Image (cartoon, coloured by chain):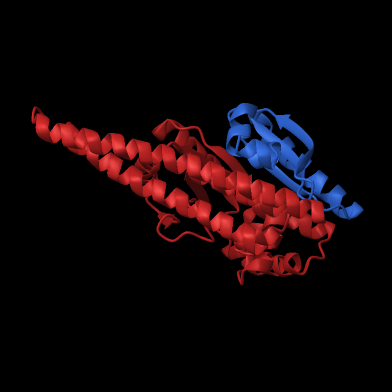
């Protein structure tokens, strides 16, 4: 699966999160580009990243920084 | 599509990203460049799944923010960035890490291994294998669970407090604690090596009970050390978090 994440670094929080099926990579890449264009036009600073994982649980395990706060990371 | 973008165009785009004034045209060009890594990334991810029976979590393309930051931080051209596409494997310990690295090197013969256990980068420890496939580099990060915990925490602190933390900057107390935590990870890794060697020795001892007893004691001692190191690191990270919370409140 593919996951498109819009992440606000200064708050350490995900703003939007969207999943795509494995066969939807072109749609996912297009969605990433559109999101970047939109944010850039509005002058909003966000990290936009497209990640691939077996499922959301696997993604949460290997990219905890996006999903957890500091205390949760070491709990 | 790839043939449409020349190296000069890529590097000029990199210069604009470095300066920070990005247009729609730049974002579209960067997107096209990143997509040129899709096939190489897919080959690497599929190879890991099929041949190594491991499930990587991948980042088919580095984010614009991360690319721009890397260009500003390092005197590097966009066409020289090696981790445009990459994936990550989390393993239990250094023994497993070495085994996976050896398998990856065999699977992707055109490779570069960057051993951040031997040369840590601002406390960051891991082993990276950059596999060159279809003339494109794909970075495979292999991290132990402790290396991963340290890296995630360092990144989160960089997000919340100061981006420089991840690269050895930031306030002194955070730097000191991250460095200390990284040293604990290194100590644990050294213990894992001793433990692994002792376990190998045991398996070759057969019925020599005196030696087996001696080696068994060494293994038990090593296992205790591994547990102690982990506890020590967790304790240190809690201090780090309290420190970070105080800094955040001051803002």
Residue A23: % across, % down? 65, 29
- Chain B image colour: red
Residue B158 image point, x, y percent: 68, 54
Q: With B108 as the anchor, is B178 left or right in this view?
A: right
**Which quadrant, please, contains the C terminus of chain B?**
bottom right
Q: Can see residue B128?
A: no
> Is residue A49 shown left or right of residue B178?
right
Which color was chain A given?
Answer: blue
Residue positioned 83% across, 60% down in the render: B23
Between A55 and B172, which is closer to the camera in this rendering?
A: B172
Is B76 placed above or below A42 here?
A: below
Q: At 40% from the left edge and 50% from the top edge, which residue is drawn?
A: B187
At which x and y percent is residue B82?
55, 58
Which residue is located at x 57 percent, y 64 percent? B80
Is residue B208 something that shows in the picture? yes
Where residue B168 sits in the image (x, y, percent)? 60, 63
Please state which of residues B39 and B215 is positioned toward the viewer in this rendering.
Answer: B215
């Amino acid at each position: 699966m593919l996951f498109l994440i819009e992440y606000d670094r200064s708050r350490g929080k995900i703003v939007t999160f969207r999943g795509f099926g494995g066969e939807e990579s072109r749609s996912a890449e297009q969605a990433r580009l559109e999101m970047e264009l939109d944010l850039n036009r509005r002058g909003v600073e966000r990290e936009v990243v497209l990640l691939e994982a077996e499922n959301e649980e696997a993604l949460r395990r290997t990219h905890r920084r996006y999903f957890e706060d500091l205390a949760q990371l070491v709990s | 599509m790839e043939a449409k973008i020349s190296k000069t165009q890529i590097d000029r785009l990199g210069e604009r990203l470095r300066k920070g004034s990005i247009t729609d045209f730049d974002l579209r060009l960067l997107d096209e460049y990143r997509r040129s890594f899709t096939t190489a990334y897919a080959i690497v991810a599929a190879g890991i799944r099929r041949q190594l029976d491991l499930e990587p979590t991948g980042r088919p393309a580095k984010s614009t923010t991360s690319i721009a930051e890397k260009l500003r931080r390092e005197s590097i051209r966009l066409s020289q960035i090696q981790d445009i596409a990459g994936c990550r494997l989390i393993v239990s310990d250094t023994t497993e890490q070495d085994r996976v690295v050896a398998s990856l090197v065999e699977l992707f013969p055109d490779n570069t291994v960057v051993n951040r256990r031997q040369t840590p980068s601002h406390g960051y420890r891991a082993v990276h294998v950059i596999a060159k496939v279809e003339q494109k580099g794909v970075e495979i990060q292999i991290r132990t669970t402790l290396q991963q915990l340290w890296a995630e925490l360092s990144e989160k602190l960089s997000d919340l407090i100061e981006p420089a933390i991840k690269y050895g900057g930031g306030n002194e107390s955070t730097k000191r604690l991250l460095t200390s935590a990284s040293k604990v990870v290194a100590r644990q890794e050294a213990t894992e090596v001793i433990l692994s060697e002792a376990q190998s020795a045991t398996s070759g001892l057969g019925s020599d009970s005196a030696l087996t007893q001696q080696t068994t004691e060494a293994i038990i001692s090593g296992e205790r050390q591994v547990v102690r190191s982990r506890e020590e690191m967790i304790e240190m990270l809690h201090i780090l978090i309290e420190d970070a919370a105080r800094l955040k409140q001051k803002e």
